[in-house]
Image (tube, rainbow, N blue to C red):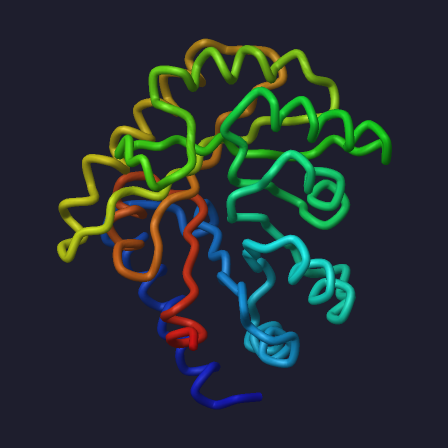
């Protein structure tokens, strides 16, 4: 086991635990996703030995090779990158949760591909909370309609929302975007749409995850603080 990796994992888990306690959150409601894109399989195996169980990938081809190499059925793999419809058939075979569904076109293709392998694919709907042209995600005002449209698909299960907010030097400046996502999640959940769970909020990364936990995050995506800066 790599000592520095073990130290970094323990440090992050302690920060999550302390933040959850500070804001009255149940630690069991918060899941750490280790963002492992570009990280080699041998280092992921070391991270597994450190106690990590959920990993986030962003590139289909890299993920196919990596997941096959690690071949550990106890590990949960999440897709957190931009997903093109023509890669849907690979995504449903590889991933337990897809965070980045932002259009009905992509949802239809995921449903079609999941049906082929007799799977109900768990997904999150990605919301462009900052309305940034450089980022994927459905506009907030469109998400309710998107949710209703997906609810009729038999091989998809919406579990919640995901967002990548604008980048600021101060984590507190990101808080309003996290609040927007939480309020949107709660509004949709109150609609009681069939086949829609709306439990999860995937938000918060290395620089702002403590604020995200305060604002209700259930899935936090952390890479740099675990694996260090990527080359």
Q: Report whether residue 9 is seen.
A: no
Q: Position of residue 187 (x, y in %)?
A: 36, 16
Q: Report whether residue 167 is seen.
A: yes
**What is the quadrant of the N terminus in the image?**
bottom right
- At 23% from the left and 50% from the top, the residue drawn is 167
Rendered image quadrant of residue 131: top left
| Apparent side of residue 231 relative to residue 39 in the rendered image (left or right) | left
- At 31% from the left and 47% from the top, the residue drawn is 213
- At 47% from the left and 90% from the top, the residue drawn is 3
Number of labels in the image equals 0
Rendered image quadrant of residue 92: top right
State the residue in front, 84 or 101: 84
93 shown above or below 192: below
- At 68% from the left and 58% from the top, the residue drawn is 61
Q: Position of residue 113 (x, y in %)?
A: 78, 32
| Apparent side of residue 152 relative to residue 131 in the rendered image (left or right) | right
| Apparent side of residue 216 relative to residue 211 in the rendered image (left or right) | right
State the residue in front, 12 or 226: 226
State the residue in front, 214 or 86: 86
Q: Position of residue 139 (x, y in %)?
A: 36, 23
| Apparent side of residue 184 relative to residue 227 in the rendered image (left or right) | left
44 shown above or below 56: below
């Amino acid at each position: 086991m790599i000592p520095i990796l073990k130290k970094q994992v323990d440090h992050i888990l302690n920060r999550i635990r302390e933040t959850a306690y500070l804001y009255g959150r149940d630690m069991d409601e918060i899941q750490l996703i280790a963002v492992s894109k570009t990280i080699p399989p041998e280092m992921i195996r070391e991270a597994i030995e450190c106690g990590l169980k959920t990993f986030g990938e962003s590139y289909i081809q890299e993920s196919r090779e990596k997941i096959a190499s690690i071949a550990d059925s106890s590990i949960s793999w999440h897709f957190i990158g931009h997903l093109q419809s023509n890669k849907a058939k690979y995504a449903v075979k590889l991933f337990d949760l897809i965070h980045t569904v932002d259009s009905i076109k992509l949802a239809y293709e995921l449903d079609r591909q999941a049906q082929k392998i007799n799977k109900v694919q768990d997904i999150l709907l990605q919301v462009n909370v900052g309305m940034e042209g450089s980022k994927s995600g459905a506009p907030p005002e469109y998400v309710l309609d998107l949710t209703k449209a997906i609810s009729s698909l038999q091989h998809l299960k919406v579990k919640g929302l995901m967002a990548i907010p604008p980048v600021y030097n101060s984590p507190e400046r990101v808080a309003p975007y996290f609040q927007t996502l939480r309020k949107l999640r709660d509004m949709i959940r109150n609609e009681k749409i069939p086949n829609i769970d709306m439990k999860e909020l995937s938000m918060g990364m290395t620089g702002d995850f403590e604020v995200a936990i305060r604002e209700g995050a259930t899935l936090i995506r952390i890479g740099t603080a675990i694996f260090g800066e990527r080359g």
